Image: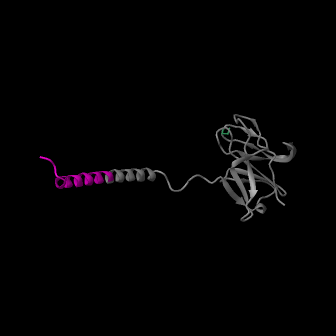
């Protein structure tokens, strides 16, 4: 017996509802999957900021100041500053500064530098000159120098721990 348009209406409706239900189920599962995966990614970054304010220039004595949180030595000579990493280039221990009995003036990369300290690593005995150059021990290279600037907001010295600079870098205040 041939199917009349009247007979096919409930079947079409059932098919439509089945497709609608299936589609809604697939969308719901996809949305739940995306939400679950998104929950694995934190909304905030826990990376340490690379630019750190370390204080007003006047708070730095002439000579050296060690900043333990940044593992950094900031040197001041009058109005001129530079910063050298305290992270040993061998396996990352914190190096110690030792004051020289007599400061030495030297020229490095065309810039005069007064050496007041040298550095040594307590872990495996690497030794560094006051400009950070490795002189003995397993350290494969010199201590890093980092970029210093003055924050326009509040005048604090700011170090960028992601921006290494050459040994001729100096920040000289007006
Ligand atoms: S970590 Fe400094 S010498 Fe090994």
Color style of the picture: one colour
Depth order, front residue of 98/138: 138
x and y percentages locating residue 64 in the rendered image: 77, 53
- Quarter holding the C terminus? bottom right
Q: Is residue 44 left or right of residue 74?
A: left
Instruction: Identify the residue shown where x is 51% and y is 56%.
Output: 43
Instruction: Identify the residue shown where x is 43% and y is 50%.
Output: 37
Q: Residue furthest left?
A: 1
x and y percentages locating residue 134 in the rendered image: 75, 38
x and y percentages locating residue 139 in the rendered image: 70, 36
Q: Is residue 86 left or right of residue 14?
A: right
Depth order, front residue of 158/94: 158
Q: Give ligand 1's quarter of the image.
A: top right
Instruction: Identify the residue shown where x is 45% and y is 52%.
Output: 38
x and y percentages locating residue 143 in the rendered image: 73, 42
Instruction: Identify the residue shown where x is 70% and y is 41%.
Output: 121
Q: Is residue 19 magenta?
A: yes
Please provide the residue range marked out in magenta: 1-23
Q: Main secondary structure of the magenta part?
A: helix
Depth order, front residue of 37/3: 3
Q: Is residue 12 magenta?
A: yes
């Amino acid at each position: 017996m041939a199917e009349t348009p009247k007979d096919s209406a409930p079947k079409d409706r059932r098919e439509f509802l089945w497709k609608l239900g299936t589609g809604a189920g697939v969308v719901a599962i996809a949305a739940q999957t995306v939400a679950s995966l998104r929950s694995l990614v934190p909304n905030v970054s826990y990376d340490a900021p690379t630019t750190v304010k370390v204080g007003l220039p006047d708070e730095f004595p002439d000579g050296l100041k060690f900043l333990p949180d940044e593992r950094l030595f900031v040197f001041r000579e009058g109005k001129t500053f530079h910063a050298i990493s305290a992270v040993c280039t061998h396996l990352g221990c914190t190096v110690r500064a030792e004051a020289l009995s007599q400061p030495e003036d030297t020229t490095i990369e065309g810039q005069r530098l007064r050496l007041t300290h040298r550095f040594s690593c307590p872990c495996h005995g690497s030794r560094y000159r006051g400009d950070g150059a490795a002189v003995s021990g397993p350290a494969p290279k010199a201590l890093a120098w980092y970029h210093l600037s003055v924050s326009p907001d509040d005048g604090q010295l700011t170090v960028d721990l992601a921006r290494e600079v050459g040994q001729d870098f100096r920040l000289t205040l007006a």
